[in-house]
Image (cartoon, helix red, strand yellow):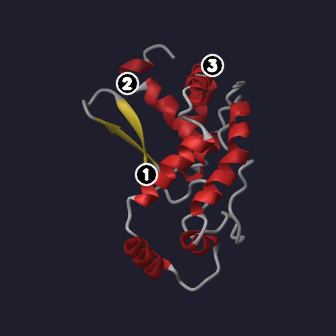
């Protein structure tokens, strides 16, 4: 704990751990995290490759190959063990658990982490793209299969995010010891 602020942006690290749990960035725990520095001294965690978020995987399939979204009720960063298979984020959770819990509480109280806020952000991003562009995206990536990715691209993605987060947020609240 001593001296970490000389090397890692602690607040940003805590936000990254929270992001991984809220959005279920399960593949960020062992491969899709970039470490970057802008001054050569302090390192930051950067998300990379957000193709598995809100219960989806890159091909619209649950990680075990079943044609379903990943359940919202699965948490992957342990609270009390270093869990070597989940790397440095689990170790930070173990060392800085109370600080991370306090940061999560602040983000919840400010309604930054909130089902309505997150779905409103997703919807506002979606509305920036004209319908012909979305149609072209669907045409390009729709392989004719009936997987989740195809069905969500064609209809209901905001609805899926809202429903998934409605299940997820109470579980993450408990994980980060948050009570309203």
| Distance CA(mark 1)–CA(mark 3) | 26 Å
Q: Quadrant of residue 154?
A: bottom right
Among numbered discs 1 and 2, the one appearing first in the sequence = 2
Q: Residue at x 44, y 30 (%)?
A: 12
Q: Is residue 137 left or right of residue 160?
A: left
Q: Indicate which label's residue lies in the foreground, 3 or 2.
A: 3
Q: Is residue 173 visible?
A: yes
Q: Report the front residue among 103 and 83.
A: 103
Q: Which mark is residue 133?
A: none
Q: Quadrant of residue 99?
A: top right
Among numbered discs 3 and 2, the one appearing first in the sequence = 2
Decide: few, some or many residues near mark 2? Use Cα within 10 Å; few <14, some 14-19, many ≥20.
Answer: few
Q: Which residue is drawn at 46% across and 25% down?
A: 11
- Pointer 1: what residue? 48
Mark 1 and mark 3 in contact? Answer it, CB < 8 Å. no
Q: Report the front residue among 149 and 128.
A: 128
Q: Is mark 2 on a helix, strand or loop?
A: loop
Q: Can residue 75 be seen in this view?
A: no
Tell me residue 131's x, y (percent): 41, 71
Q: What element carries label 3?
A: helix
| Depicted 100 relative to depicted 126: above or below | above
Q: Which residue is drawn at 58% across and 47% down?
A: 23
Q: Which mark is residue 7?
A: 2
Tell me residue 16's x, y (percent): 50, 37
Name the residue furthest top.
Answer: 2
- Pointer 3: what residue? 98
Q: Residue at x 66, y 47 (%)?
A: 165
């Amino acid at each position: 704990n001593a001296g970490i602020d000389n090397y890692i942006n602690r607040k940003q690290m805590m936000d990254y751990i929270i992001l991984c749990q809220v959005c279920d960035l399960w593949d960020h725990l062992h491969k899709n995290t970039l470490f970057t520095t802008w001054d050569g001294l302090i390192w930051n965690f950067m998300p990379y490759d957000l193709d598995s978020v809100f219960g989806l995987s890159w091909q619209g399939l649950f990680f075990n190959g079943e044609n379903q979204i990943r359940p919202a009720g699965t948490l992957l960063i342990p609270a009390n063990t270093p869990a070597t298979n989940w790397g440095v984020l689990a170790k930070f959770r173990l060392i800085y658990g109370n600080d991370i819990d306090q940061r999560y509480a602040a983000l919840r109280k400010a309604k930054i982490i909130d089902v309505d806020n997150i779905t409103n952000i997703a919807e506002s991003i979606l509305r920036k793209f004209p319908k012909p562009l979305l149609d072209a995206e669907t045409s390009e990536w729709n392989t004719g299969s009936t997987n989740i990715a195809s069905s969500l691209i064609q209809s209901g993605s905001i609805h899926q995010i809202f429903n998934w987060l409605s299940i997820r947020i109470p579980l993450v609240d408990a994980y980060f010891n948050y009570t309203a």
